[in-house]
């Protein structure tokens, strides 16, 4: 099942207890990291999709899994937890 994710208005945890959150536009930061550190055309296409997204955008389960794998290697723990919480809230 596809997931809608709004990277323009992304809710990022600001504390390990997940009580403090901040809404941020993470499109450029996440897309740049994927573009700079990712491997292959699939990462390239996904980075561009994230960068060019406006509002809630549909992502396939495969795209979301790639985002998670990449985030776990290159992004901050707060970003990883925030991204994972989107999957948990859509279940």
Image (cartoon, rainbow, N blue to C red):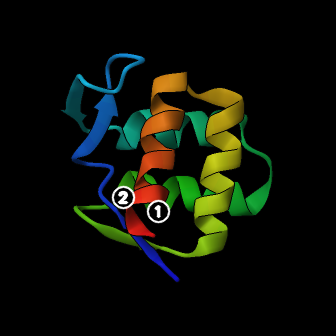
The residue located at (41%, 54%) in the rendering is 86
- Residue at image mark 1: 49
Image-based side of 35 in relation to 17, left or right: right
Residue that protrudes farthest toward the right in the picture:
40
Above or below, 11 against 54 in this view is above
Q: Secondary structure at mark 2?
A: helix
Image-based side of 1 in relation to 21, left or right: right
Crowd class of label 1 (few under 14; some 14 to 19; many from 20; radius 10 Å): some
Above or below, 42 against 51 in this view is below
Q: Quadrant of the C terminus?
A: bottom left
**Quarter-wise, where is residue 27 in the image?**
top left
Above or below, 65 against 20 in this view is below
Residue 2: x and y, percent? 48, 79
Crowd class of label 2 (few under 14; some 14 to 19; many from 20; radius 10 Å): some
Q: Secondary structure at mark 1?
A: helix
Nearest the eye: 8 or 21: 21
Circles 2 and 1, Cβ within 8 Å, touching? The answer is yes
- Residue at image mark 2: 52
Tally of marks: 2
Nearest the eye: 72 or 48: 72
Image-based side of 21 in relation to 64, left or right: left
Residue that protrudes farthest toward the bottom in the picture:
1
Residue 54: x and y, percent? 25, 61
Residue 33: x and y, percent? 58, 33
Nearest the eye: 77 or 58: 77
The residue located at (68%, 42%) in the rendering is 70
**Quarter-wise, where is residue 58 in the image?**
bottom left
């Amino acid at each position: 099942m596809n997931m809608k994710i709004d990277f323009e208005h992304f809710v990022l945890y600001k504390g390990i207890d997940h009580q403090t959150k901040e809404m941020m536009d993470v499109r450029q930061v996440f897309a740049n990291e994927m573009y700079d550190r990712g491997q292959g055309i699939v990462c390239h296409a996904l980075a561009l999709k994230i960068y060019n997204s406006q509002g809630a955008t549909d992502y396939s389960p495969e795209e979301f899994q790639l985002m998670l794998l990449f985030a776990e290697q290159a992004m901050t723990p707060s970003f990883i937890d925030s991204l994972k919480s989107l999957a948990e809230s859509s279940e």
